[in-house]
Amino acid sequence: MKNDQELQSEQLKRYKYIIENIKDVIWEMNMDFVFTFVSPNVHDMLGYEVEEIVGRKMPDFLIEESRNYFFNESTPRTKRRIDGDTEGIFLYDVQFICKNGLVKWVQVSAKPMFGAKKFMGYIGSTRDITETKEYESQLKEYIEELRTLNSKLEKMATLDVLTGAYNRRKFDDDLNALIVEKEKHGIIFSLIFFDLDHFKTINDCYGHKTGDIVLRQISELVLKNIRTTDRLFRWGGEEFIILLNGSNFKNAKKVAGKLWRIIQNHDFGISRKITISMGVGEYKLGETTDQIIIRLDTALLKAKSEGRNRVISC
């Protein structure tokens, strides 16, 4: 039967074997973060020999950002343990400078040591997590790419490709949202419904390509002369709608008049003036989306029937 000394010797051999053959580096530091023991596998992980580590401070091997992070985290946490806090093991993800100058991500697991209720230092381990961090970085890049792609797809789903204005689907969503806001909070808003006069003649005389250019220029002129809180939508063909969030009927008429003058005085690069007919109205509480559109459309039709190139209020 083995005596206590033999059992203890076997146990020490077993511990030594474990320490030397696991991937993690086992270490001990004093209260000043100076290594007093490091397991030999530090060479496989970081390229250093044991004697090149022992006697040196652990933060000296960290890049500046990780060093600052380590001090900012470890000092108050250790103080809390000394003051009687029951917080256990500390975990830090830091960047460690290898002997060959390369930098590796490592996870430091540290536990404060106490003897006779006196703080003595730390024991812990260091694990190479470079590969994990690389996967995390790749995942973040992939997620960012997906966000960018989703943003582009969302724009494609809500924008009219030709003019850059929002499309009719987006108009329906925004109008319904504003109606809800009106009913809940009494927020006012107005609409301008307009189309280009004799647009078919422009297409017939100058070609559809020129007609497309005119539509794009109309959209650009409107977007430059309305607020960022207002929105322009292409209703269809040469027809557009402007949602004026927070604008009453009086302000909407001013905006309509301004746009009417800007467009009729703009040089579109063809041998004729471009004019528009407009219907303007403020949303009335209780109206459905169909009712407000019919009211604006009626005003627009009236503008056309009275000779075009004018603004009709409703």
Image: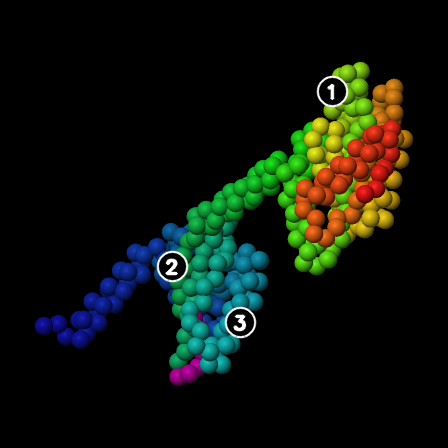
Q: CA distance from mark 2 to mark 1?
A: 71 Å
Q: Secondary structure at mark 2?
A: strand
Which residue position is annotated with label 3? 75
Which residue is found at the position 75% from the left and 50% from the top? Answer: 284
Q: CA distance from mark 3 to mark 2?
A: 22 Å
- The kind of residue tagged 3 is Thr
Q: Disc 2 or 1, which lies upstream in sequence?
A: 2
Q: Is residue 305 visible?
A: yes
Q: Disc 3 or 2, which lies upstream in sequence?
A: 2
Which residue position is annotated with label 1? 209
Magenta highlight range: 116-122
Which residue position is annotated with label 2? 25
In the current view of this chain or complex, which residue is farthest to the bottom? 116
- The kind of residue tagged 1 is Lys
| Residue 205, above or below 220 | above
- Image spot of residue 56 (x, y percent): 48, 64
Quarter of the figure with the N terminus: bottom left
Name the chief secondary structure element in magenta: strand
Q: Is residue 246 left or right of residue 104?
A: right
**Tag on residue 82?**
none
- Image spot of residue 256 (x, y percent): 84, 40
The reply to whether the magenta stretch includes residue 120 is yes
Q: Are marks 3 and 2 in contact (CB under 8 Å)?
A: no
Q: Disc 3 or 1, which lies upstream in sequence?
A: 3
Give the quarter of the image for residue 201. top right
Callout 2 environment at 10 Å: few (<14), some (14 to 19), or many (20+)? many
Q: Nearer the viewer, mark 3 or mark 2?
A: 3
Q: Are marks 2 and 1 in contact (CB under 8 Å)?
A: no
Q: Is residue 122 left or right of residue 247?
A: left
Q: Nearer the viewer, mark 3 or mark 1?
A: 1
Q: Is residue 242 left or right of residue 306?
A: left
Q: CA distance from mark 3 to mark 1?
A: 70 Å
